[in-house]
Image (spheres, helix red, strand yellow):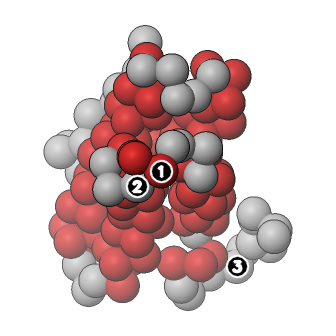
């Protein structure tokens, strides 16, 4: 999967957005991680991780398809909220011993990168609603 469209290419679809491509990769990586959870977490942590992970690219896609910058920005904000939720769930999974810290590194690094990209995109759209955040 190529992550960058050729220069001077117009964005025609959410699929052309690098942030959406990376968010999609994050969702797939999160699903792989969720498979490590025990069966008793099927309707708990596993399902929450999957829903939060899918929400990120889904909201980018939905927001991009909206007609106004305000709608797009709002969906980018929702995506960032889902990212924070995903990070929290992965941290909890680690805290209770379901994940080794090393196992979550790829997802957490991708989440951080996507969050920064969403912030920059929202800023370029002229939003003051989305604030930068840092991972402690």
Instruction: Rate crowding at label 3 as few (under 14), some (14 to 19) or many (20 or more) other CA atoms within 10 Å.
Output: few
Instruction: Tell me the residue at 61%/20% (across/down).
Output: 101
Using the image as rendered, state which of residue 61 and residue 29 is in the foreground.
29
Q: Quadrant of the C terminus?
A: top left
Instruction: Tell me the residue at 70%/79% (across/down).
Output: 9
Q: Mark 1 points at which residue?
A: 39
Q: Is residue 67 above or below residue 29?
A: below
Instruction: Rate crowding at label 2 as few (under 14), some (14 to 19) or many (20 or more) other CA atoms within 10 Å.
Output: few
Q: Is residue 135 above or below residue 87?
A: above
Q: Distance between the residues labelled 2 and 3?
A: 42 Å
Question: How far across and how far down the image is residue 100, in percent?
Answer: 63, 22
Q: Mark 2 points at which residue?
A: 42
Q: Distance between the residues labelled 2 and 1?
A: 5 Å
Residue 82 in sight = no
- Residue 9's mark? 3
On the rendered structure, is 38 left or right of 134? right
- Residue 56's mark? none
Q: Earlier in the sequence, mark 2 or mark 3?
A: 3
Labelled pair 2, 1 in contact (Cβ < 8 Å) = yes
């Amino acid at each position: 999967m190529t992550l960058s469209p050729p220069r001077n290419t117009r964005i025609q679809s959410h699929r052309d957005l690098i942030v959406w491509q990376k968010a999609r990769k994050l969702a797939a990586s999160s699903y792989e991680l969720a498979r490590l959870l025990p069966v008793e977490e099927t309707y708990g942590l596993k399902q929450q991780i999957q829903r939060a992970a899918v929400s990120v690219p889904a909201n980018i896609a939905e927001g991009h398809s909206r007609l106004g910058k305000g709608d797009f920005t709002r969906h980018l904000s929702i995506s960032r909220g889902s990212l924070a939720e995903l990070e929290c769930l992965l941290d909890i999974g680690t805290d209770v011993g379901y994940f080794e810290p090393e196992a979550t590194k790829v997802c957490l690094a991708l989440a951080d990168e996507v969050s920064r990209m969403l912030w920059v995109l929202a800023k370029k759209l002229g939003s003051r609603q989305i604030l930068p955040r840092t991972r402690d």
